[in-house]
Amino acid sequence: MNVQPLLGSTGHLARDRTSVALSHPRRYLVTELAIGEDATTHPALPDVGSELTIGSYKVTCDRVEVEEYHSDNAVTVAAYYSNDGRFRFPEFPSNPSDPDNRSWDIGYKKSTIDVPQFFRGERTYKDSSFATVSAPYWIRSDWKLDIEMQVFNTRLILDGVSQSNIRAIVQTVNGQLGKLHRFDNRWWQFQPPTIRSNKPDVVEIFYSWVHDPGNGPISKPNGYADNEVVLAGQRLPFWVYNVAPQTEARPVPQIYTQDLFPEDSPYLEPNGWQNLPGNPI
């Protein structure tokens, strides 16, 4: 397979107040194709999700598809770029009002997290003068907490999908795996979906997200005074517990929470669900 960029097809940037895109796709002539070979898979072609910088603007490849067939072994491949996913394929199911093309459900699954806890004890040792002394010693005792996580599932059917666009669909979906999306006034983590095709030009997608509700502060065990136990506090959704252990400078250990998706995390993409094929939400 041979790939040659076509002159005069790079396009120019079209800008508005909030977004930019290439006004025309970048086109490539692909020749010497073997029978049945996917013309969009050559390493010289851009991948969906790859970035392109033009001046001070950065755009992302939304879609790569065969645009025109010249012969059995020669085609034109087009790559579409934007910074807002406007060229992602396909945007909508063929008939979103048809109940056979779209369905959804909300369920639950149980997840278990480790909750750290410390109990105060005493230890006896010899100091530098060989005198016997006693000092507080905090004993860690983690326990398991079951979290009921809400699960949002949606199923949709896309028809009229060419073989060359199935790869674009898979790459677009893979670009969102594990990311945190926001809808219904809460955060959801995107799960690996099921994508299958049982008929020519028809793709069925099962999307799934989970919502971690977090948990409140942990109550004190019966029979212990406040100065005898160190407890975990409230945990926000998609945060985890962590521990600063006892040291000479920190005589009492601390339990704190840590954000799994800070503001600079590449996995924090509130509107990432909007770019998924089929407009699932």
Image (spheres, helix red, strand yellow):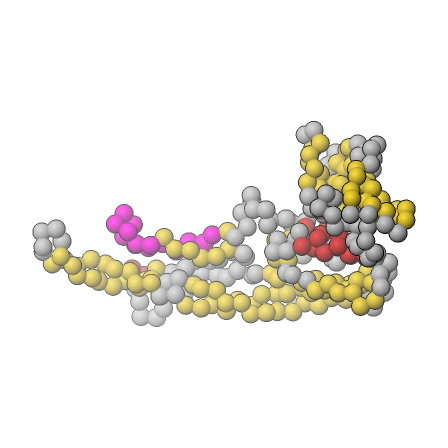
Residue 88 in the image: x percent, y percent?
A: 77, 49
Looking at the rendering, the stretch of residues picked out in magenta corresponds to: 245-258
Between 247 and 29, the residue placed more toward the observer is 29
Between 66 and 207, the residue placed more toward the observer is 66
Q: Quadrant of the C terminus?
A: bottom right
Q: Is residue 89 above or below residue 23?
A: below
Does the magenta run of residues contain 197?
A: no
Between 79 and 91, the residue placed more toward the observer is 79
Q: Is residue 59 left or right of residue 248?
A: right
- Image quadrant in which you'd find residue 189: bottom right
Residue at the image point whose x is 83% and y is 67% from the top = 199
Q: Is residue 100 visible?
A: yes
- Dominant secondary structure of the residues highlighted in magenta in the image: loop
Residue 92 in the image: x percent, y percent?
A: 81, 55
Residue 182 in the image: x percent, y percent?
A: 65, 53
Residue at the image point whose x is 48% and y is 57% from the top = 240
* Extreme-right residue of the structure: 70
Q: Is residue 169 above or below residue 143?
A: above
Number of numbered discs = 0
Between 31 and 187, the residue placed more toward the observer is 31
Residue 178 in the image: x percent, y percent?
A: 61, 56
Residue at the image point whose x is 80% and y is 68% from the top = 198
Q: Is residue 61 above or below residue 111?
A: above
